[in-house]
Image (cartoon, rainbow, N blue to C red):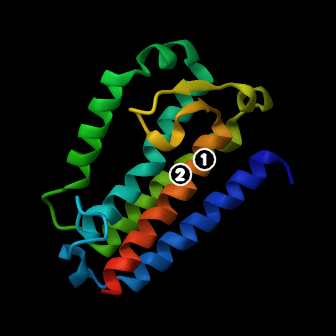
Amino acid sequence: MGLKEELIAELEATLQNFHHILDAVPEAAYVHPSANPAWTIGDLLYHITLGPAFIRTEMWLLCHATGFWQIVMNDFTGRVFNWGNALFARQPKRITRQSLLKAYAAGHAGMVSSLRRLRDRDFEKSVNYPASFVAELEGAVTVERLVRYLVRHCDVHAQEIKEALNK
């Protein structure tokens, strides 16, 4: 199995994990605080669904507009990204299990499609992330590192949801 297939398999496992998370959380619990002090359980679930679209965009920029991406990758952009991330995760509309499934499935399908279209040389490209953008990605970031970050991102938030439910 090559790297591309390995990453797609990891994304497939993450999709299944997301389904397990949703199966474990009753919709009535979406309004309860999570173990992440900034968000409710519903906010965290919605935030997880945003990950694939954001990572897919970053992956495209890394592969097709590396110079541009490197120029905009700075502390100011990091602050704007983190502000927007917090804003978008708090949706005023009612979040439902079905809307979360639909959103994650669309993001997941896009990620897999993008990965399948990548050329071998795309996996060799990288950009340098400042800590202010995404602290866990500080340093040289490749497509592989972006995809694996997405997997860990889901796992970390799933753990925060699990901790909240166990209280």
Element under disc 1? helix
| Relative side of 41 to 8, left or right | left
Residue 125, located in which quarter of the rendered image?
Answer: top right
Point out residue 162 in the picture as x, y percentages from the top left corner.
Answer: 40, 79
Residue drawn 47% across the image and 52% down it: 107
Amino acid carrying mark 2 in the image: Leu
Q: Residue at x 40, y 33 (%)?
A: 133
**Tag 1: amino acid:** Val
User: As displayed, is residue 19 above or below residue 45?
Assistant: below
Q: Residue at x 62, y 58 (%)?
A: 11
- Residue 149 x %, y %: 56, 49
The residue under label 1 is: 147
Task: Look at the numbered discs 2 and 1 and tell me whether their residues touch, using CB distance below 8 Å.
Answer: yes
Residue 69, image x and y in percent?
49, 20
Q: Which mark is residue 68?
A: none
- Nearer to me, 65 or 163: 163
Identify which residue, 19 or 129, lies in the foreground.
Answer: 129
Marks 2 and 1, how far apart at CA = 5 Å
- Where 116 falls versus 79 (above or below)? below
Query: Mark 2 falls on what kind of element?
Result: helix
Looking at the image, residue 68 lies above or below residue 137: above
The residue carrying mark 2 is: 150
Tell me if mark 1 has few (under 14), some (14-19) or many (20+) residues whose alpha carbon lies within 10 angstroms of its own: many
Find residue 119 and report its image quarter.
top right
- Residue extending farthest to the right is 1
The image shows residue 76, relative to residue 147, as above or below, that is above
Q: Which quarter shows the C terminus?
A: bottom left
Residue at left offset 44%, top offset 22%: 73
Q: Position of residue 142 (x, y in %)?
A: 65, 33
Q: Can you tell which quarter of the image residue 122 is in? A: top right
